[in-house]
Image: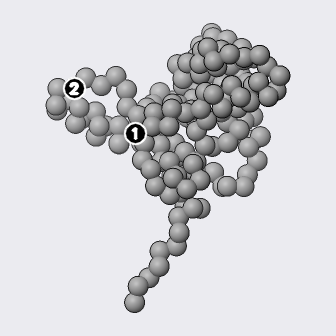
Amino acid sequence: MASPFPRKVHDHQVCIKSALGDADILCRSRGVRLTPARQRVLEIVWRQHKPTGAYQILDILRAEGNKAEPPTVYRALEFLMQNGLVHRIQSLNAFVGCCYPSEQHDGIFLICRSCGIAGEIPSMAVNDVVMDVADSNGFSLSSISLEAVGECPECRKPIQEHH
């Protein structure tokens, strides 16, 4: 499996272009509109691979001269989440672009405490374990959102050997 973490230095424009292309295809296939406001919010979320809060998005829109208000941003984010284009990182109350928008799945994230990047990992095996535990305890799941915090490969310090 490829690393869920992009290289620290890479062209985010490629990520944005790919995400917008995927969003366009997905929305057309579902018969829903990717309005300019929704598209711009998606672009802002994909500007980096760190979770972005709704008010950060609002600040960027306003800095661009947009007179957006919080409900506009929240409605766009809700649309993007409903259509599997972004995920909400619950612990940070922030959003990241979905790396697998054409696949029905729950979000499993590795969040780096050093640089703040959030890597999405596709793992049906993890989902299956959580579903089995819920089922065996009579719990009816509606969704799964798992967040693990640690350090990404580029931030992790080399392990010092003790002799």
User: Within 10 angstroms of label 2, few (less than 14), some, or many (20 or more) residues?
Assistant: few
Residue 148 higher or lower than 66, as above or below: below
Horizontal and vertical percent position of residue 53: 59, 32
Residue 139, numbered circle: 2
- Note whether residue 126 is visible: yes
Horizontal and vertical percent position of residue 101: 57, 29
Q: Amino acid at mark 2?
A: Phe
- Residue at (35, 37) in percent of width and height: 127
Residue with the most extreme right position? 65
Residue 89, numbered circle: none
User: Within 10 angstroms of label 1, few (less than 14), some, or many (20 or more) residues?
Assistant: some
- Indicate the secondary structure of the residue bearing disc 1: strand
Residue 115 higher or lower than 135, as above or below: below
Q: Quadrant of residue 135?
A: top left
Pointer 1: what residue? 146
Residue with the most extreme left position? 137
Q: How many marks?
A: 2
Q: Amino acid at mark 1?
A: Leu
Name the image quarter holding the C terminus.
bottom left
Whether the residues at callouts 1 and 2 have beta carbons within 8 Å, the answer is no
- Note whether residue 22 is visible: no
- Residue at (61, 27) in percent of width and height: 54
Horizontal and vertical percent position of residue 62: 76, 24
- Indicate the secondary structure of the residue bearing disc 2: loop
Residue with the most extreme bottom position? 163
- Residue at (54, 45) in percent of width and height: 118
- Residue at (63, 18) in percent of width and height: 70
Residue 130 higher or lower than 3, as above or below: above
Circle nearer the N terminus (1, 2): 2
Horizontal and vertical percent position of residue 98: 57, 34
Q: CA distance from mark 1 to mark 2?
A: 17 Å
